[in-house]
Image (cartoon, rainbow, N blue to C red):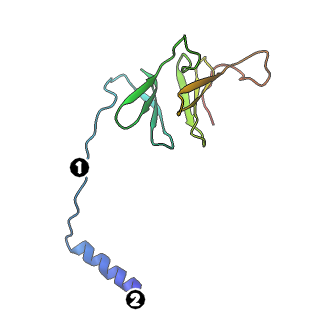
């Protein structure tokens, strides 16, 4: 009986001409540089989008504005220099970046402090080299 009621109700809804308001979708251009090719994008558990692009490196998009993370040679806690090749966000919402020539970076989005892991010939458990192409 319930199944018959459901089918009848569903058919009446389809045939009844019920009009539902559509969403008014508007798209905003976030990256306006045609050379700004995005080659990786991830979303963290807070809803922020993390972008890797050719022109600007690492960027965080909060739905309104972009925040760009640049290397500051005077700050050991800034993002590593060089091209970022890979991006992953782990189960603890930690950002991991693999770079070309600058090793592996770890960043907690709550603090925006970057920790660097580099190849060290004197340390057997360090990276095997400073180019990290993929992170699993």
Residue extending furthest toward the bottom: 1
Residue 126 seen by the camera = yes
- Real-space Cα separation, disc 1 to disc 2, in angstroms: 39 Å
Q: Which mark is residue 24?
A: 1
Along the viewing direction, whichever of 25 and 109 lies nearer the viewer: 109
Q: Quadrant of residue 32?
A: top left
The mark nearer the N terminus, 1 or 2, is 2
| Image spot of residue 9 (x, y percent) | 30, 79
| Image spot of residue 82 (x, y percent) | 54, 16
Q: Can you say whether 4 is above or below 45 in the image?
A: below
Q: Can you say whether 30 is above or below 45 in the image?
A: above
Q: Is residue 106 left or right of residue 15?
A: right
Residue identified by numbered label 2:
1
Residue occupying the point 57% across, 20% down: 77
Q: Nearer the viewer, mark 1 or mark 2?
A: 1
Circle 2 Cα neighbour tier, 10 Å, few/some/many (<14 / 14–19 / ≥20): few
Along the viewing direction, whichever of 121 and 107 lies nearer the viewer: 107
Residue occupying the point 31% across, 82% down: 8
Q: Are marks 1 and 2 in contact (CB under 8 Å)?
A: no
| Image spot of residue 56 (x, y percent) | 43, 21
| Image spot of residue 31 (x, y percent) | 34, 28
Residue 54 seen by the camera = no
Q: Quadrant of residue 14?
A: bottom left
Q: Is residue 75 left or right of residue 55?
A: right
Residue occupying the point 23% across, 63% down: 20
């Amino acid at each position: 009986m319930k199944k018959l009621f459901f089918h009848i109700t569903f058919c009446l809804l389809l045939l009844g001409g019920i009009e539902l308001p559509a969403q008014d979708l508007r798209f905003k251009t976030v990256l306006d540089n045609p050379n700004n090719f995005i080659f990786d994008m991830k979303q963290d558990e807070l809803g922020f989008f993390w972008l890797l692009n050719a022109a600007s490196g690492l960027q965080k998009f909060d739905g309104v504005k972009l925040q760009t993370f640049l290397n500051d040679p005077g700050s050991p806690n800034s993002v590593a220099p060089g091209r970022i090749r890979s991006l992953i966000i782990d189960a603890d919402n930690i950002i991991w970046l693999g770079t070309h020539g600058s090793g592996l970076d770890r960043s907690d989005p709550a603090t925006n402090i970057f920790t660097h892991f580099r190849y060290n010939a004197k340390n057997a458990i360090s990276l095997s080299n400073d180019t990290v192409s993929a992170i699993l």
